[in-house]
Amino acid sequence: MRWEAKIELDARGRTFATGLLADLIAALRRSSQGDLLAISGDGPALGVDLDAWCRFTGNTLIGSAIESGRTRWVIRCGAAPANPDADRPPGSRLWLYTNFDCNLCCDYCCVRSSPAAPRRELGLARVQRIARESPALGVREIFVTGGEPFLLADISEILTACAAAAPTTVLTNGMLFSGRRLAELRSLPRGRVTLQISLDSPTPEGHDRHRGPGTWARAWVGIRKARAEGFRVRLAATVSTDAQADAFRRFLDAQQVAEQDRVIRRIALRGFASEGLAFARADLVPEITITAEGVYWHPVGAEDADLLVSREIFPLAESFAAVRVAFEQEREHPRRLAAIFHCA
Ligand code: SF4
């Protein structure tokens, strides 16, 4: 993906030692927290200095790409928002992308799902093997997502296999619970399967603006059906501003939704999104994520090359080990920088 930046700098052959640093600091002074700043230069060497400088100054090197034979690095001003899950051991949560097609086409979908997206199915056999191998690797919760998982004919078998391994939450837009799919839902073990249904706003306007006309009302019907069937339902909102988050919290208060059944997150600048929070791998505590194409660092970028850990899923123990080793290396960075940048 190409990150659009607020400020574009051209290094024009300069390095930190020959004048680039002053331009960089001036650009940051014109920026606000979360703004993106791009630097174009010749050759990859500058990236090493930019990475070290960002880590030392509390900014974040989001990524780089070759454009017209030159390298363009993108920096996000400021640190990522505090992560309340930072202490969770990597691998305790496992995410499975069962498919990438969806009945909706939300304009901020982080994995570009839509009715036209190829299915790219993980498949029941692989899910069953993952479910068998994951408890021994420390998995304590499984999250099943997509795309829309309830488009799959074998979704109840997939969820039942996951639920046998660990408590399982399935992320859904909640719009397909009728006919055969309602029967699939009814067959699931209530004590082990939670539904996380997307609802972005207290009233239809905000939700429908991103997800399509009439989708809020259909999601609300799905929430009521799932509750009536005896399922625990978590409501998950994707918002753009703190004011939207506060409005949704007030709505959840009025609905008497328990704290543990609320998920409110900002739009991530990935996939279809044209605005939102930009995240780099270094910002994200890994939540191991498996798709048909391989193992990823985090579900927010489950088709992005910068978050790909391995094309090989199995043996699962090796995939988990690769993520944990990479995480240890990330955590080593601040310690190494502290050793390099002596102030006195
Ligand atoms: S955000 Fe969810 S509901 Fe919307 S297109 Fe993506 S997968 Fe489908």
Image (tube, rainbow, N blue to C red):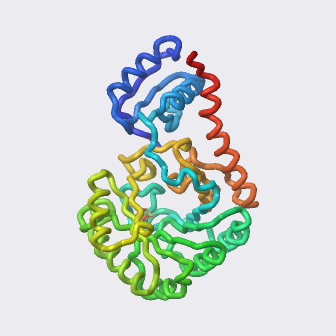
Picture residue at 41% right of the left edge, 18% below the top: 23
Asked if residue 103 can be seen in this view, the reply is no
Total tally of numbered discs in the picture: 0
Picture residue at 46% right of the left edge, 17% below the top: 20
Asked if residue 174 can be seen in this view, the reply is yes
Q: Residue furthest front?
A: 344
- The location of residue 109, given as percent across then percent down, is 42, 57
- The location of residue 230, given as percent across then percent down, is 45, 85
- The location of residue 286, given as percent across then percent down, is 59, 51
Picture residue at 52% right of the left edge, 54% below the top: 85
In depth, the one of 100 and 89 nearer the eye is: 89
Locate the C terminus and report the quarter of the image it occupies: top right
Tell me which corner region of the image, top left, top right, bottom left or bottom right, holds residue 44: top right
Q: As displayed, is residue 242 above or below residue 201?
A: above
- The location of residue 314, given as percent across then percent down, is 73, 60
Quadrant of the picture in which ligand 1 is shown: bottom left
Q: As displayed, is residue 117 above or below residue 67?
A: below
Picture residue at 48% right of the left edge, 65% below the top: 147
State left or right for residue 267 relative to residue 334: left
State left or right for residue 21 relative to residue 144: left
Tell me which corner region of the image, top left, top right, bottom left or bottom right, holds residue 336: top right
Q: As displayed, is residue 50 above or below residue 225?
A: above
